[in-house]
Image (cartoon, grey):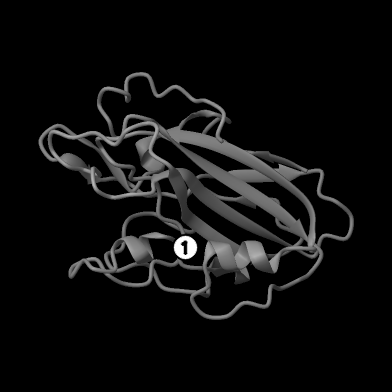
Amino acid sequence: MKLASLSFSDNEALSERYAFGRIDAQTHVALADNCNPQFSWDDVPEGTRSFALVAHDPDVPSKPDDVNQEGREVPADLPRVDFYHWVLIDLAPETREIEEGAFSNGITPRGKGGPMAPQGTRQGVNSYTDWFAADHDMSGDYFGYDGPCPPWNDTIAHHYVFTLYALSVPKLELEGAFTGADVLAAIKGKVLAQASLTGTYTLNPDLAPKQIGTTSA
């Protein structure tokens, strides 16, 4: 199976159009357009009965001590963990494209609703649900797509891995506010094929002019 995008090239920088946050000279970070990227695919295996799309960042700091702190940096050698940005399931087997902005076209404080989503699909909660849990103004269930907003003082650019799975079942047995980890567990033994694209993004002004894409770990 082949996955392609008109929004970005594999292992190259994502535009701030697809991000939750953008660089701001005064405040470090400002809200961005937060549009979901466009995707299309072909060479789908016979027997495919649905698709699932999972987007995650494997470069999120495992400890928050230095994150977005003036006069400090998030060191490159700090262990990293996964952060899910989009969990989309039950895409019909005849689907071959996701249009730009069809699932997200802006930021919704306290999160977009779900799990029901356009085109008869369902979306799980992304990791902003946990990130904003203690924030009085932003806490809520963040269903669907919310783009990159890595620490502005991180010494590495982050990778955003979009993986499409062709599945042998028409619907995953998940309910309510399911997560990326829930989906990955639910698709075990049901994946006929998968394909990925990776984009990079940074809010560190020292790295932004480069925005060099490298292979994700």
State the residue at coordinates (58%, 55%): 54
Q: Could you tell me residue 17's position as x and y percent?
A: 37, 41
Q: Is residue 67 above or below residue 172?
A: above
Answer with left or right where residue 33 lies relative to residue 25: right
Q: Is residue 111 above or below residue 154?
A: below
Name the foreground residue: 118 vs 68. Answer: 68
Answer with left or right where residue 216 lies relative to residue 144: right
State the residue at coordinates (50%, 35%): 199
Q: Quadrant of residue 68?
A: top left
Residue with the mark numbered 1 = 144
Q: Residue furthest bottom?
A: 175
Q: Which quarter shows the N terminus?
A: top right
Q: Note whether residue 121 is visible.
A: yes
Q: Is residue 172 above or below residue 17?
A: below
Q: Could you tell me residue 15's position as x and y percent?
A: 40, 34
- Amino acid type at circle 1 is Gly
Q: Could you tell me residue 119's position as x and y percent?
A: 60, 67
State the residue at coordinates (31%, 63%): 108
Task: Give the secondary structure at mark 1.
Answer: loop
Q: Note whether residue 94 is visible.
A: no
Q: Could you tell me residue 167's position as x and y percent?
A: 77, 61
Q: Residue furthest right?
A: 46
Label 1: how many Cα within 10 Å (few below 14, some 14–19, many 20+): many
State the residue at coordinates (52%, 25%): 214
